[in-house]
C-alpha cells in the first residue's frame, strides 16, 4: 500500500484543532466546578466537554506520528533525546506556573516558593493541565521497543497490535464496568495483558494513520464509528446506563473512536492544500501549537488577577474565551519557540 508524503501539512492542522479543542475542554471542566450541577450553564459546559474530550487522545496520536517516524533509535537516544528533555520541560513549566501563582495569586515572590514549585513539579504535582507530560514520558521510556516494532512490523502485524490495544485497553474495560461478573471480565483479569494497555494504542495508532493509506470503505466506516462514539459520549449514560465518567474517560472506546475519526477526516478531507507556502505555514504553527496549550493557563491567571471575566452565556462564552486565549498565547509560544537550543523543546 502507498504511504503518505511525510511533508504533508495535515498533521499540523490536526494538532492546531486538537489543541484548541483541548482548551475548550479545560474551560468547560473548570466552569462546571463553579456551576450548580444540573443547571442550564452546567449542561451547556457538559456538552462542550463531550464534544472536545477526544482532543486529549488526539494529542497522544500526534506525538506518536512524529516520535515513531523513521528508523528505530537506541536506548540512549530515547533517554537522552526524549525522556530527560521532556522531564526537564515539565519541571520548567511547573516551576514557571508556581512563580506565576505566587506573583498573581499570592502577591509575592520568594526563593522558597520557587523551590517548592520546582520540587512539586519534579515529584509529580505540577499545575493541573501539565499532567499530560507524565504518560508521555512513560511512552518515551518505551520508545526503543515501540519504535523497533513499528519500523520492522508488517502492516498486518501493526493492525493486529492495534486491535489488541482497542480490545483490552478500551472496549473490554467498558464491558466489564457493565458486567463485572461476566466471563469476559474474568478472562481479562486472568490474562493480565499490560503491554497493550494505557496510551500505547493511541501512540501507535497515530503513527499508523499517518504512515499508511486506508481504503474508502474503511475510511467511511471510521467516520460512522466516530459519529457513534460522539453520540455515546454525550448520551451513553442515559441511553445505556453507567456513570458519566465512564463515557467521558480519555480511553473510553467511544472517545478513542471519535479521535480516530477526526484524524482520518483531517488527513483525507480537511488537509492543507498542496500549495507549498500554505502547507509550510500550517506546519510551522503546528510545531508550537502545544506551546499554546502550555501557555494559555498563564493568561487565565492574569485575567483572574485583573478581575476580568467574560459574562457571556456559556454557549458563546466558552468558545469565545478559548479563542481569545489561543490568540493571546500564540505570540508567547512563538517567542518561546525562537529561544535558541531549548525553544523547540519547550513548545512541542
Image (spheres, rainbow, N blue to C red):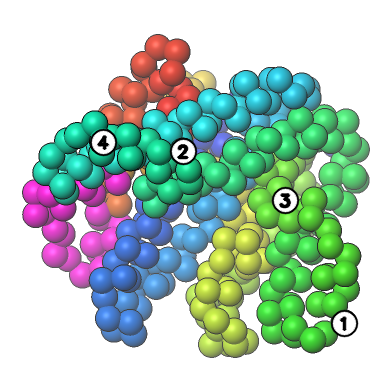
Question: Looking at the image, is 237 positioned above or below residue 139?
Answer: below
Q: Residue at x 87, y 82 (%)?
A: 183
Tell me the number on the disc at residue 112. 4
Decide which of tag 4 and tag 3 comes sooner along the chain: 4
Report, in whole angstroms, how far the alpha carbon at label 3 lies from the one at label 2. Answer: 27 Å
Measured from the top left, where is residue 75 in percent x and y?
A: 75, 24
Q: Which residues are magenta?
A: 297-321
Q: Nearer the viewer, mark 3 or mark 1?
A: 1
Q: CA distance from mark 3 to mark 1?
A: 24 Å
Spatial separation of the CA atoms under disc 1 and disc 2: 42 Å
Q: Nearer the viewer, residue 103 or 47?
A: 103
The residue identified by callout 2 is 122
- Element assignment for label 4: helix
Secondary structure under badge 1? Answer: helix
Q: Residue furthest front?
A: 112
**Element type at mark 3:** helix
Q: Which residue is mark 1?
A: 183
Callout 2 secondary element: helix
Amino acid at each position: 500500500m502507498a504511504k503518505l508524503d511525510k511533508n504533508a501539512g495535515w498533521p499540523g492542522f490536526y494538532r492546531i484543532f486538537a489543541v484548541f479543542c483541548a482548551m475548550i475542554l479545560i474551560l468547560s471542566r473548570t466552569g462546571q466546578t463553579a456551576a450548580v450541577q444540573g443547571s442550564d450553564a452546567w449542561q451547556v459546559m457538559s456538552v462542550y466537554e463531550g464534544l472536545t474530550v477526544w482532543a486529549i487522545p488526539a494529542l497522544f496520536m500526534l506525538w506518536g506520528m512524529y516520535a515513531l517516524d523513521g528508523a528505530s533509535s537506541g536506548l540512549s537516544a530515547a533517554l537522552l533525546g526524549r525522556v530527560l528533555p521532556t522531564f526537564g520541560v515539565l519541571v520548567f513549566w511547573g516551576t514557571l506556573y508556581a512563580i506565576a501563582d505566587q506573583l498573581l495569586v499570592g502577591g509575592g515572590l520568594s526563593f522558597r516558593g520557587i523551590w517548592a514549585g520546582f520540587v512539586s513539579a519534579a515529584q509529580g504535582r505540577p499545575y493541573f493541565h501539565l499532567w499530560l507530560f507524565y504518560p508521555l514520558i512513560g511512552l518515551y521510556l518505551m520508545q526503543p521497543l515501540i519504535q523497533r516494532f513499528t519500523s520492522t512490523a508488517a502492516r498486518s502485524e501493526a493492525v493486529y497490535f492495534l486491535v489488541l490495544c482497542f480490545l483490552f485497553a478500551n472496549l473490554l474495560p467498558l464491558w466489564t464496568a457493565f458486567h463485572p461478573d461476566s466471563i469476559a471480565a474474568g478472562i481479562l483479569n486472568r490474562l493480565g495483558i499490560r503491554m497493550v494497555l494505557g496510551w500505547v494504542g493511541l501512540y501507535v495508532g497515530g503513527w499508523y494513520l499517518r504512515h499508511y493509506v486506508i481504503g474508502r470503505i474503511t475510511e467511511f466506516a471510521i467516520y460512522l464509528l466516530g459519529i457513534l462514539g460522539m453520540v455515546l459520549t454525550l448520551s451513553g449514560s442515559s441511553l445505556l446506563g453507567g456513570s458519566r465518567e465512564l463515557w467521558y474517560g480519555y480511553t473510553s472506546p467511544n472517545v478513542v473512536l471519535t479521535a480516530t475519526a477526526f484524524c482520518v477526516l483531517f488527513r483525507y478531507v480537511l488537509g492543507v492544500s498542496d500549495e507549498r507556502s500554505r502547507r509550510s505555514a500550517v506546519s510551522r504553527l503546528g510545531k508550537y501549537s502545544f506551546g499554546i496549550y502550555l501557555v494559555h493557563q498563564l493568561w487565565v491567571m492574569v485575567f483572574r488577577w485583573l478581575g476580568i471575566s467574560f459574562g457571556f452565556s456559556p454557549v458563546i462564552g466558552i468558545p469565545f474565551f478559548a479563542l481569545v486565549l489561543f490568540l493571546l498565547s500564540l505570540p508567547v509560544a512563538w517567542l518561546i519557540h525562537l529561544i535558541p537550543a531549548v525553544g523547540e523543546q519547550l513548545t512541542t
